[in-house]
Image (cartoon, coloured by chain):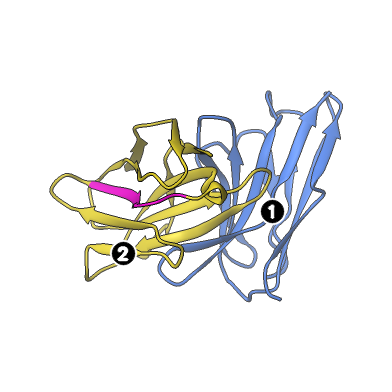
Amino acid sequence: DGGITQSPKYLFRKEGQNVTLSCEQNLNHDAMYWYRQDPGQGLRLIYYSQIVNDFQKGDIAEGYSVSREKKESFPLTVTSAQKNPTAFYLCASRWGANVLTFGAGSRLTVL
Amino acid sequence: AQSVTQLDSQVPVFEEAPVELRCNYSSSVSVYLFWYVQYPNQGLQLLLKYLSGSTLVESINGFEAEFNKSQTSFHLRKPSVHISDTAEYFCAVSGRQAAGNKLTFGGGTRVLVKP
């Protein structure tokens, strides 16, 4: 079945550590997105990529980095510069008229 | 710039009763509108979308939403809810122009269906 796979599902990080969240898709979609979800705040866009080797900052990019070396993969690194990284992170890809398909999410907790 | 406001953060409702989730948006350009549903600890799933044509759109599981351009609204309704409809619902908007293609989400409405 086609879809988006995010890993790990749960991740714990000590303060000062960088962590990388994986996002892989087999849908052959060009555009991919990373969102952060906090209770009561909906989803906020971190980074997005419309084609391989190109990506743009979203609304809350500070403290995060991404790469897009392959069409299928769009990993997100949460750096030590991110002041409040505890959140639920969602990866998505776009098809048709701006319709998004989401992965199951990764929950990051800072200890 | 665009924004989405979901007026209710939580909506408790009894099983088999109707429910309406309110969504208002603002945008300087023509829009596409979406409702997504999220079950606990899962990603979002597309519930329904308005792209063009009829302003009333329906999902396969009984939800419907109506695009009202004059009121800039896209409210979601279901005439009779089930326990399985307990979830969080997100309204989203994007501009129709090709550049950017970013979706803006509302804060979500948590629906709790009680027996």
Q: Amino acid at mark 2?
A: Val
Identify which residue, B80 or A45, lies in the foreground.
Answer: B80
Q: Is residue B1 above or below residue B45?
A: above
Q: Is residue B75 visible?
A: yes
Residue at the far left in the pictured view: B70
Q: Quadrant of residue B6?
A: top left
Image colour assigned to chain B = yellow
Residue labelled with disc 1: A104
Position in image of residue B71 (x %, y %): 16, 44
| Chain for disc number 2 | B
Residues in magenta?
A: B73-81
Identify which residue, A89 or B98, lies in the foreground.
Answer: A89
Task: Residue at 63% x, 68% y: name it.
Answer: A52
Task: Residue at 67% x, 68% y: name it.
Answer: A3
Residue labelled with disc 2: B57
Q: Amino acid at mark 1?
A: Ala
Task: Residue at 50% x, 50% y: name it.
Answer: B82
Q: Secondary structure at mark 1?
A: loop
Identify which residue, B105 or A64, lies in the foreground.
Answer: B105
Residue under disc 2 on the same chain as residue under disc 1: no
Quadrant of the drawing holding the N terminus of chain B: top left
Position in image of residue A13 (x %, y %): 85, 31
